Amino acid sequence: MSRRELSGLSIEHEGIICEVLTALYTAYVISIRCVVPEYKVNLDKLIRLLIEEKRANPSNYALVVLSEGAEWEGYQVREYGEADAYGHRKKASVAESLGDEIKRRSGEETMVSDLTYDLRSGDPDFVDKLVGLTFGNMAYDAMLDGKTGLMSALVKGCYELVPIPDPKLGPRKLDVATMYNTERYRPNYANKRGLPAFLQGAS
């Protein structure tokens, strides 16, 4: 999808299998707005920022990326379909809900794009290949040594084998104070000195 083909507000959506940081990193490298689960945005303010951005753009579009689980003030998760064996029903797309709400409140047309597979279908670059190959070989070496319960990781910029995190700890959380600008609904670009290459601001 060419950005120049858009003439409205485009909502890029990260699927549930992605980490929150994937959405944040996507927004970080292309300098766009993003909505993350750890912070409920004010929807009227978000819409105003997006419309201002669209009007200031000669190509007449604005982008926002949402992480699965993102919400805004007053948002209620919609469910549909029959419950599964565990009593869970399917959850409606938060991106579709946002698109509908933007159109209802502002009259602006929106386009929703699911990035879940788009971000995974590109050709790997040098870093992808180097880190992936090294992780795989480390895991293989651990298996040959009879080691279990470990995973390959980068720790302070160095390759290490570390214990697999306890599932009881739950998902990683974004450190909003250091990684997210709650006034502009963007990644925080300031105060990065001393951080690792991938800005690991999650706990």
Image (cartoon, rainbow, N blue to C red):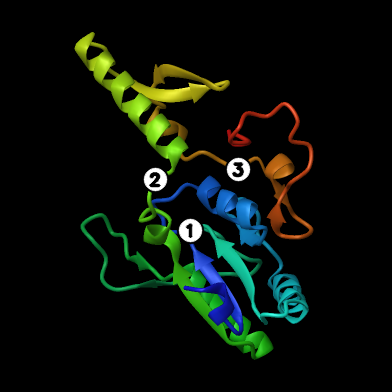
For the point 39% across and 19% down, which residue is it? Answer: 163
- As displayed, is residue 197 above or below residue 17? above
Q: Residues within 10 Å of mark 1 (few under 14, many from 20)?
A: many
Which is closer to the viewer, label 1 or label 2? Answer: 2
Marks 2 and 1: in contact by CB < 8 Å? Answer: no
- As displayed, is residue 75 above or below residue 128? below
- As displayed, is residue 75 above or below residue 190? below
Residue type highlighted by circle 2: Pro
Farthest top residue?
Answer: 145
Marking on residue 68:
1
Marking on residue 124:
2
Quarter location, residue 161: top left
Residue 12: image x %, image y %? 52, 67
- As displayed, is residue 177 above or below residue 55? above
Instruction: Give the mark nearest the N terminus, 3 or 2.
Output: 2
Residue type highlighted by circle 3: Leu
For the point 67% across and 82% down, which residue is it? Answer: 60
Marking on residue 29:
none
Indicate left or right for 39 with 172 as reference. Answer: right
Instruction: Give the mark nearest the N terminus, 1 or 2.
Output: 1
| Disc 3: which residue | 174
Element carrying mark 2? loop
Q: Nearer the viewer, residue 101 or 143?
A: 143
Residue 149: image x %, image y %? 31, 19
Element carrying mark 1? loop
Which is closer to the viewer, label 3 or label 2? Answer: 2
Residue 128: image x %, image y %? 42, 38
Residue type highlighted by circle 1: Glu
Indicate left or right for 149 with 127 as reference. Answer: left
Q: Nearer the viewer, residue 79 or 93?
A: 93
Indicate left or right for 20 with 151 as reference. Answer: right
